[in-house]
Amino acid sequence: MVLIRCPAKPASPDPEGLPTRRHDPRPAQRGPMFVPSHYRPPDSSWMVEIIKNNPLAQLTSNGEPGDVPFATHLPVVPESLDDEAADLAGSVLLCHLNRANPHWSALEDGTAVLLTFTGPHAYVTPAVYEYTPAAPTWNFTAVHVRGTVEKIDSIVETLGVVTATVRAFESRFGSDWDMTGSIDYFRKIVPAVGAFRVRVTGAQGMFKLSQEQSSEARDRVRRSFLGNPSARHREVAGLMDRLKR
């Protein structure tokens, strides 16, 4: 049975331009990323979690005037990451890419860059709301990190970035592979690696988890995600569950 429910007051638009059922009077968070106030993370630790759990980021920086921006997907490892800072300013991230990539040549010390981290996300079908009218949307999590580049020229320090990357990812996503026998190989390939630090000047997080919906509709969305075989859907459900506590 489809239940017809009319909103008590006119709907306000969500970031996709679709109608929502709740309006938050607080202003949207300022910055390059549009973040309505009700989609902000509860605290900066939520952004740190997205960065650590989803370390393959998109690095973007300006190209020449009239050209499209440079964009490169690359692994990011925190050298220091302060989850007590409201916007992560002052944190330092380690990155590397292929020196043959034109993006490397375009980077200079002080270049302003944007790192985009995409976390769990899932499509929301209006069927789960159990009322009409309704519209589809997408629940998602993302963190945009702004910072400036500090290029690393030393071969020794570049090797340190590579080994730090291996240690970070093997412990979290691998099988604790022992790199000892491959260090000489690393030394051979490191001259082709462009390593750099991103000194964070600010960050914004977007945690769109059906906060605009009624608690009943939001719970139906969460339960539909839990019942989905996709691990991604279940991750979103877990975040929704944490957010309501």
Image (spheres, rainbow, N blue to C red):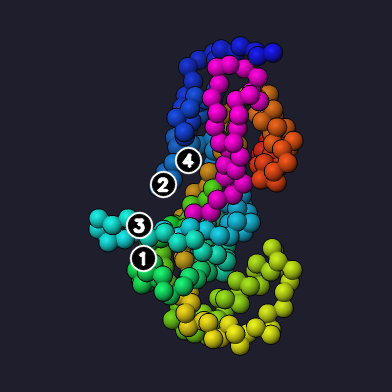
Do the residues under discs 2 and 1 have CB atoms within 8 angstroms? Answer: no
Callout 1, which amino acid?
A: Thr
Residue 138 pos. (x, y %): 56, 36
User: Of marks 3 and 4, which one's residue comes earlier in the chain?
Assistant: 4
| 228 inside magenta stretch | no
In front: 243, or 53? 53
Query: Which mark lies nearer to you, 2 or 1?
Result: 1
Residue 33 pos. (x, y %): 44, 45
Instruction: Please indicate whether residue 176 sits to the left or right of residue 100 in the image.
Output: right
User: Would you name the residue on which mark 3 appears?
Assistant: 69
Do the residues under discs 3 and 1 have CB atoms within 8 angstroms? Answer: no
Callout 2, which amino acid?
A: Gly
What residue lies at 48% left-to-right and 27% top-to-bottom? 18
What residue lies at 42% left-to-right and 43% top-to-bottom? 30
Residue 225, picture quadrant? top right
> Mark 2 falls on what kind of element?
loop
User: Would you name the residue on which mark 1 appears?
Assistant: 111
Q: Is residue 235 visible?
A: no
User: Would you name the residue on which mark 2 appears?
Assistant: 31
What residue lies at 44% left-to-right and 35% top-to-bottom? 27
Do the residues under discs 1 and 4 have CB atoms within 8 angstroms? Answer: no
Query: Which mark lies nearer to you, 3 or 1?
Result: 3
User: Would you name the residue on which mark 4 appears?
Assistant: 35
Residue 70 pos. (x, y %): 37, 60
Callout 4, which amino acid?
A: Val
Residue 134, picture quadrant? top right
